[in-house]
Image (cartoon, grey):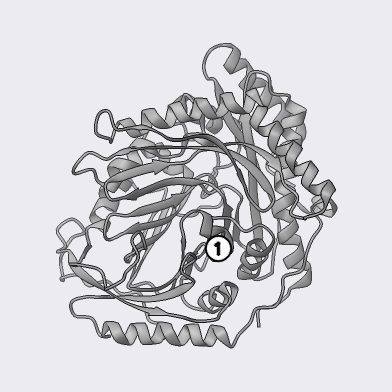
Amino acid sequence: MTQRKIQRIMTEGESETDATSLPCQLHGRKIKASVSLDAVSEIFAQLESPSILGGNAAVAKTGRFSLWAADPFDVFEFTANQQDPFDELEAVLRRYSHGTSPPPQWPDGLFAGGWIGHFSYELGRYIERMPRAAVDDLAIPLIRLCFYDRFIAYDHHKDVFWAAALEMPGDSEAPMEKIDQLEQLLKTATDSPVSRPPSASIGDVDFSAAKGNMEPSDYIRSVERIKRYIRDGDVYQVNFSQRFDRAFTGRPIDLFHWQNRFNPSPYAAYIDAGDFQVVSTSPEMFITVRDGLIHTQPIKGTRPRLNTEDHDSQETNRRNREELWASEKERAELNMIVDLERNDIARICEPGTRHVVQPRSIEAFPTVYHAMATVGGTLRRGTRFIDILRAVFPGGSITGAPKIRAMEIIDELEPTARSIYTGSIGFVGLDGTVCLNIAIRTVIITAHKAFVQTGGGIVADSDPKAEWDETITKARALLAGIEAVQESRFKGS
């Protein structure tokens, strides 16, 4: 694929709000290829402004499709010093419109072209009036979306790739030319295997190399303060987090390879914006929108899972799974967030349609068990994407309940802005489909540093020291990959 300058077709003198929408017709070609997903990621990482969603085997259990895109046709960014993200976002999303019908045999639910990118947690300040106590030291855009007119998708259920391109008015390349270039990228990936990432022991992580944004004593005092707020009736639960950073001069895509091998997650993502990169290994879906239906799938409750087949490991896994299922504390926390999410989506759904699609269940992931539930409903006719964001963002599982008061407390007690952490990463399709994750287990890389943030739900009977230990344990799992990549400096072939 030839790299090109990002372009935008606009009439001279035309404003963002009165630009004529460009119709985009989707074309696609099904391709059977024996190529590793890591190799495809490696090839795309070398292009301009790549975005990868999924790219590992865990996707097969959830979204079904992995996506690779690069060399965007258009880029939209909204920063913290701007005024109204939603009017601007609405105008941006109207720049391009969906054509008639998808190509023959196009799989139902597959991304049909559009925008891929992130929404930072602090976007919530524009939905509800929030204080601004936390310092935004990373200065990453609150929204960054790339419009891609070509992409590769992999159907994990059918074991087949799709090369897809949008046909646009005045386009300098025919859609089949774009697809030919994508197919050539797949052929290049077939001949370019990626080196095996080095393993790492989480227990042996050198935590002294990481710097926190608060001292242990500050963290414990903050948890005690949250518990006082709970006793005073201000809030029922607050998701409180802390951030760690360490030097990182390795390749961000190597970290993505590492995570996809040792911690494959269904809503994994890789974003390279030039000045910063994001490696997300999120297991949590924030929202999906498809055929007029919206779903959200909060996670509350985690236990470790050993990924070996010996008897002792299987016995340990059985005990951990049963303990999570039986935990009244974890059950109560999830029920609380389910109620919050039901109330959020009720704002945008047809009356009587919101419901719990899947009650609390325990799902197995490569390294953990999670307790989760699914809430859904039928969107009101005419509901726009910005209406959905205003109603549900950020996700209740990473704020607490009630949401607004929990967010105020988070801003009061967390010293630095969360940025992309606990925001969302994913796509907004031209055909109205949406899939966004909750950006937990997410590493932000900028200025030769890797930033890792971890947290947990604080409730009335939380033990501050145990909560501290939990954040350290979660951080170790991410720092292990950073350390392994940083020290080995392995290179994709």
| Residue 215 visible in image | no
The residue that label 1 is drawn on is 277
Q: Position of residue 371 (x, y in %)?
A: 59, 37
Q: Residue furthest top?
A: 232
Q: Secondary structure at mark 1?
A: strand
At x 71%, y 60%, the residue is: 482
User: Between 47 and 293, which is closer to the camera in this rendering?
Assistant: 293
Q: Position of residue 17 (x, y in %)?
A: 18, 55
User: Between 249 and 442, which is closer to the camera in this rendering?
Assistant: 442
**Amino acid at dot 1:** Gln
The quadrant of the image that shows the C terminus is: bottom right
Q: Position of residue 71 (x, y in %)?
A: 41, 75
| Residue 464 visible in image | yes
User: Between 359 and 351, which is closer to the camera in this rendering?
Assistant: 359
Q: Is residue 288 left or right of residue 474?
A: left
Label tally: 1
The quarter of the picture where residue 446 lies is bottom right
Disc 1 crowd, CA 10 A, few/some/many (<14, 14-19, 20+): many
The quadrant of the image that shows the N terminus is: bottom left
The quarter of the picture where residue 491 lies is bottom right
